[in-house]
């Protein structure tokens, strides 16, 4: 048994720790197996080889404890076992629900999901798509809120499979899962009109985004169809879809206009509107009804509970994940397009002041649905 001498610092000569054996490489595997490096690489990457060669190479790799380098393998055309997800804001509850839906599919298929927050910057998203040539993932799910020609070209030329969640132009050569948020706003507006509200406002996100443009168009269509005069419909655009931006937009709106109902382009904006109304002594829904969009899990935690339009974030994520996995296994498939209809979920924030549903069931535009969760 070896013992340290007085004054020694460790078991090695001159007090040095024993050096670790070098990590086995493909060269050492090939040398032990008595084959070329190319032959060893072909066997370990699943290529064709004679049974005796496969046996020698695999036995040598096992003896040496050789583990293939996943990065190098991916560069040679193998799979990484990883998928990417790029969203505008990883803190937004909508994207969290979407991520969970995606991961429920991809993890069951043995993939790890890597998350990237683009800040809704199209240039960042284009760079993300272009970086697929580095083969750090086997495929990408991306959720752009602004779509321009350079992004569409990057998607068409992507060097790995891509699935897009969001609205794309007809004929875009990429797998796509969409919804109709303009129809969602129309569902919410029909509901508010059915409860007797007549002074409507929309707190929107940026109108230069795809969801912002769709929701603005939906609001304008309903207001026009209902014959509301210009004085009874107001629009305020937030700088983005965050709670902080919603507070600023709500203050600007209420400084010039007192609505009896406010439609909001997502739930975070709706919570900001409710907070601002409370700061000004206005009750929800007694004085002003409020609706959101996305139907995140926060809607049921809030007081009052928030009426919101579900755009089926988790289900869209699951659908996109299935599309991406199919594309990885079958790259020859033609581009596919799926559409999921919105669903209005009625809760406390949009009930009439007396707490009753109002003047009957709201009109439901085509492809929409209404669910009541009143207590």
Image (cartoon, rainbow, N blue to C red):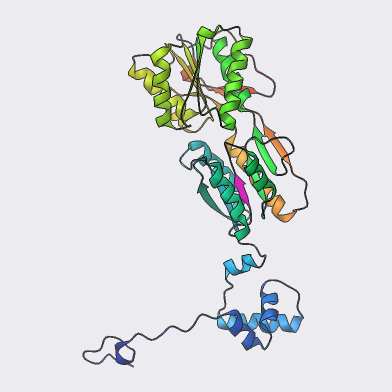
Q: Nearer the viewer, residue 255 or 359?
A: 255
The residue sitting at the left extreme is 7
Q: Position of residue 355 (x, y in %)?
A: 47, 12
| Residue 314 x/y as whole percent | 58, 39
Tell me the residue at 21%/89% (across/down). Answer: 7
Across and down, in percent, residue 351 comes to 49, 14
- Residue 139 colored in magenta in the image: yes
Q: Does the magenta segment cover residue 184?
A: no
Instruction: Report the residue at 63% width, 87% height from top.
Output: 31
In the image, 238: left or right of 104? left
**Count of numbered badges drawn on the protein:** 0
User: Which quarter of the rendered picture does the N terminus lie within?
Assistant: bottom left
Q: Is residue 86 shown above or below 344?
A: below
Vertical position of residue 155 compared to residue 262: above or below: below
Q: Residue at 46% across / 12% down in the picture?
A: 259
Residue 267, position in %: x, y?
Answer: 48, 28
User: Which residue occupies 67% across, 65% down?
Assistant: 77
The answer to whether residue 310 is visible is no
Q: Nearer the viewer, residue 26 or 235?
A: 235
Type of secondary structure dominating the magenta stretch: strand
Residue 177 visible in the snapshot? yes
Q: Which residues are magenta?
A: 138-142
């Amino acid at each position: 048994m070896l013992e340290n001498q007085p004054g020694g610092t460790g078991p090695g000569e001159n007090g040095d720790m024993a050096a670790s054996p070098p990590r086995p490489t493909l060269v050492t595997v090939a040398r032990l197996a008595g084959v070329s490096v190319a032959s060893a690489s072909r066997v370990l990457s699943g290529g064709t080889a004679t049974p005796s060669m496969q046996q020698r190479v695999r036995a040598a790799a096992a003896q040496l404890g050789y583990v293939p380098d996943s990065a190098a393998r991916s560069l040679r055309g193998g799979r990484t076992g990883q998928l990417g997800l790029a969203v505008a804001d990883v803190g937004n509850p909508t994207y969290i629900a979407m991520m969970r839906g995606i991961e429920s599919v991809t993890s069951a298929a043995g993939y790890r999901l890597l998350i990237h927050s683009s800040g809704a910057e199209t240039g960042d998203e284009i760079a993300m798509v272009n970086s697929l040539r580095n083969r750090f993932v086997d495929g990408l799910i991306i959720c752009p809120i602004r779509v321009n020609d350079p992004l569409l070209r990057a998607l068409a030329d992507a060097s790995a499979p891509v699935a897009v969640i969001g609205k794309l132009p007809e004929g875009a050569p990429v797998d796509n899962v969409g919804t109709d948020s303009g129809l969602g706003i129309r569902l919410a507006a029909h509901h508010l009109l059915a409860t007797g509200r007549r002074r409507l406002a929309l707190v929107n996100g940026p109108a230069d985004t795809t969801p912002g443009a769709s929701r603005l168009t939906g609001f304008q269509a309903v207001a026009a169809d209902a014959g509301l005069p210009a004085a009874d419909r107001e629009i305020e655009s937030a700088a983005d879809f965050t709670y902080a931006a919603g507070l600023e937009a709500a203050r600007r709106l209420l400084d010039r206009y007192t609505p009896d109902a406010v439609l909001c382009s997502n739930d975070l904006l709706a919570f900001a509107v409710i907070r601002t109304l409370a700061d000004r002594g206005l009750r929800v829904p007694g004085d002003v009804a409020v609706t959101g969009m996305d139907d995140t899990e926060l809607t049921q935690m809030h007081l009052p509970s928030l009426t919101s339009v579900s755009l089926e974030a988790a289900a869209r994520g699951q659908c996109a994940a299935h599309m991406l996995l199919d594309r990885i296994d079958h790259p020859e498939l033609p581009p596919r397009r799926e559409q999921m209809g919105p669903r209005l979920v009625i809760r406390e924030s949009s009930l009439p002041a007396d707490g009753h549903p109002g003047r009957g069931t709201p009109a439901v535009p085509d492809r929409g649905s209404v669910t009541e969760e009143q207590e």
